[in-house]
Amino acid sequence: MRNAWSGHTFPHPAGRRRWMKDASSMDPDRPVQYILEHHRHLGPIFEIVVFGQKFVFVTDAELAAELNDESRFAKANSPALDGLRGIAGDGLFTAYNEEPNWQLAHDLLVPAFTKQAMQRYHPVMAETLDELFTVWDAGTGRVDASADMTRLTLETIGRTGFSQAFGSFTTTELHPFVEGMVTALTIGRRKGVIGALPAAKLLERRLDRQHAEQLDYVNRFLDDIVVARRRAPTSGGDDLLGIMLDQAHPETGARLSDENIRYQILTFLVAGHETTSGALSFALYYLVRHPEALAKVQAETDAILGPDPDATPSYEQVARFRYIRKVLDEALRLWPTAPGYARTPRETTTLGGRWTMTPGDWALVFLPLVQRDPAVWGETADAFDPDRPRPPRLASTAKPFGTGERACIGRQFAVHEATMALARILHRYDVTGDPAYELRIDERLTLMPQGMELTLSRRTPGLSAPGGAAPGGMPRPRSRPPGHRAVPKPSY
């Protein structure tokens, strides 16, 4: 039995079968939402066994805090993450802890996210937003929020990190790289599921053959970026690609191979846009359903940016949008776009004073429930409340960017980009949503609202509807938004 946990058996869904085990208790297309709807009562720690593969989920903040202890635990690659290694190799996200390219790439790229580096990226972020606004102003006022946030964040990381534009604002068609990248993510998730099935290798090879053309295109596209830069180096050479191509480790002199550089580019393009676009989309979803929060956001933008709807904040001003940051934090608490991470012990240890773990065992810190633990967030833990008090005890278990030395290296980049984008969007536009929209979430390896259309109208700063009522009469939120009628408790 993989992930044996010294023979420990945890609570599990009812109806376990002899061979399939708990396979029938999962929805492979929406596993995160299915667990929230059907299995949250199994916590604080439970298992789902699919044929021979044992998945152990931790949903309790106390246990999560213990697993986050870097002196005792380290990152583990879940089956879904291992499923991505066919295309992402030993990139920063998918590398094993002991693989040398992880430490090498990490040491080389840390300087790419310093304050000085962020100041260089800031104007590119602003210019990319301007292009999105040009498209919006020329349109009908009705936009697909998630799709446009994805275009925005992909262009931003492409231009800032690799001087690579994707033409996201010149056509309504997705760039073929985006389609290939989504395919790669979907394949990775599916491999994480089918890896436990009989004849798994055969099924995985069939999956690769079915999508070989798209996956080959992704590899060729990334390799072409490297070739083009080598032929025509940029003057600065201090973006992510320039650092990887031009710099050696200051102590060892080691350099990244072109193959590993391809893996790193893919990692940053995926992690640098999927999670940020999801955070922006969930924040917009909640704001149009909470007019009092939307009014506070727009009051904050008016106070900082003044009466000009086209105002662009300076780099220093972005940190002043404290309420917007609370909105983003609260949206990521409820719907972390990367919904979990796996942890394994560095040596044999006991978790929670009860369960023996040995190296090779792993547990999934299931963030959508850890970050809704009533012991930390109170009885209203499932509700959206940016003003929610954050009690010091265990509040640090809110980890939407991961934990420890393997946490997201680009967290500062993502937070800065998302804060500025939300501030500028809501300073420039009044935003309303469809009252009939039911939250649908697309699950790849990340979470993203699906089919969420918003109506935009140009705004005069300082003249929003008074009393916290959103323009357009968006109704007050229900105790449970309509997309989750089958869930008895949470309101998301």
Image (cartoon, rainbow, N blue to C red):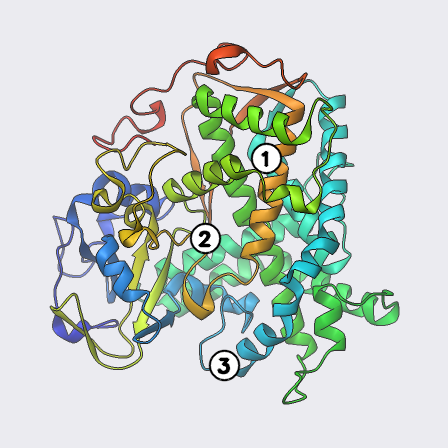
Q: CA–CA distance between discs 3 and 1?
A: 38 Å
Q: Find disc 3 in the rendering and name its residue.
A: 99
> Going by the image, does 68 lie left or right of 309?
left
Residue ranking furthest to the bottom:
252
Direction from residue 491 to residue 170 in the image, left or right: right
Residue 166 visible (yes or no):
no
Report helix, strand or loop for mark 3.
Answer: loop
- Identity, as a three-letter code, of the amino acid under mark 1: Leu
Camera-side residue: 182 or 242? 242
Q: Looking at the image, is mark 1 or mark 2 earlier in the sequence?
A: 1
x, y (%) of residue 77?
40, 68
Q: Residues within 10 Å of mark 2 (few under 14, many from 20)?
A: many
From the viewer's perspective, is the residue at label 3 or at label 1 nearer? 1
Residue 402 position within the rendered picture, expressed as x and y whole percent measured from the top left: 43, 59
Which of the 4 image quarters holds residue 229? bottom right
Location of mark 2 (residue): 445
For the residues labelled 1 and 2, the Cα–Cα distance comes to: 24 Å
Mark number for residue 422? 1
Amino acid type at circle 3 is Glu
Q: Tell me where residue 158 appears, x and y as whole percent.
A: 70, 53
Task: Please tell me which residue lies in front, 438 or 413.
Answer: 413
